[in-house]
Amino acid sequence: MAYMAATEESFEYKVKGTTLANGNFSYTPQEGMQYPSCHLTKGFTLPGQSSTALMDFAFLAATSFAGPKEAQSLLDTWFGRGKVVDRHEFVEQYRVETDTLGGVSYKLYSFPDNPGYGVVGIRGSETLLDWVVDVQLWSAAALAQFVRAFMPLGWIWTPIFDELVFVVNSVESESLRRASYYKRTTQFINDVLSGAYGDGEFHTLRVTGASLGGGLSIITGAQTGAYTVAISGLNAMMSRRTFDPPLTEEQLNTRVFNVIPDRDFIAMIDDRAQLFQETQCRAPMNSLFGCHSMWRSVCELSYQCGSENRPILCWCVTKYGYPEPTPAEGSNVTWKEACASDYA
């Protein structure tokens, strides 16, 4: 199948200024109780692995914000050259053929050593329209949470709050339908897995995303049956009946995993499903949205779980306040030399 060249307009998102250290440095797992989900198993693994580091999914979610020019370089540095490929031409051709170039942006990562396997990464909030979509899709759930918090014994009414959210959202159903980013990502995955697009190249897909992308990945993964790892994603348990098609508790409790940093108010919207990992946050207490950061989550998982054989983000030290990692034995490159552009 031939694919047209991706246009810069479709894929050249904001450059994030991220730099992976040029040198051999590492974090060892921290003492004490580690996060139980430092490594994921069963349906959440990447191909060829019995378990997958949670930070790998966090990195793929963060890389979904990058354009193709920077994304492939980041992937090669993190996973090894050619191990994971940004299939932007595949996605671009699909969006052209289905007339869905506007709205939500997403990537498809393939694994050449494991044909047929891919990960869909959904970009999070970047534009004003993205934030409007956040409000429209999750405002009723957020309102219900607020009411429950101040209602005496409000938790008793949790079993009926999904009904309340459904009724509230039904009033603005036409508006919600116009803002339903998730319908496009769900259709893409269904078309690819069914062979309707891509000539059956992929038989297994996973989904990931951060922020709004995390919320959309939760909905998309539940609807398609694709195992999903979200980073700071908006939850969907309370609003599950408002989506089309509706989600079930079983789908959310068995197919979706969400990383929820401490003091991340965005990731606290809606009720979480059963699979999640709370993480620490080193952002200042007066930083309202400091904990809602995909790259900070990458650093937190790298530091707490150990970086293994992955490179370390310079921002972990220069921006987020983590200690300098340990250089490899015999290395003559200092951390500041490896991240010289961040210290300039």
Image (cartoon, rainbow, N blue to C red):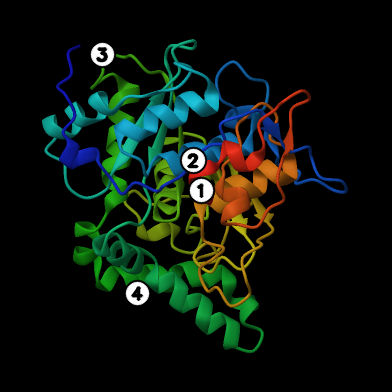
Identify the mark at residue 168; answer none if there is no mark: 4
Is 42 left, or right, of 220 in this rendering? Answer: right
Identify the mark at residue 342; answer none if there is no mark: 1
| Of the image marks 2 and 1, the number of the one nearer the N terminus | 2
Visible residue check, residue 223: yes
Quarter of the view holding residue 28: top right
Where disc 4 sits, the SS reads helix
| Of the image marks 2 and 3, the number of the one nearer the N terminus | 2
Quarter of the view holding residue 24: top right
Crowd rating for badge 1 (residues with CA inside 10 Å; few <14, some 14–19, many 20+) = some
Nearer the observer, disc 1 or disc 4? Answer: 1
Is 154 drawn above or below residue 315 in the view shown? below
Q: Amino acid at mark 3?
A: Asp
Nearer the observer, disc 3 or disc 1? Answer: 1
Q: Mark 1 and mark 2 in contact (Cβ < 8 Å)? A: yes
| Of the image marks 4 and 2, the number of the one nearer the N terminus | 2
Q: Amino acid at mark 2?
A: Thr
| Of the image marks 1 and 4, the number of the one nearer the N terminus | 4
Where disc 3 sits, the SS reads loop
Quarter holding the N terminus? top left
Is 179 left, or right, of 293 in this rendering? Answer: left
The residue singled out by tag 3 in the image is 199
CA distance for labels 1 and 4: 48 Å
The residue singled out by tag 2 in the image is 19
Q: Mark 4 and mark 3 in contact (Cβ < 8 Å)? A: no
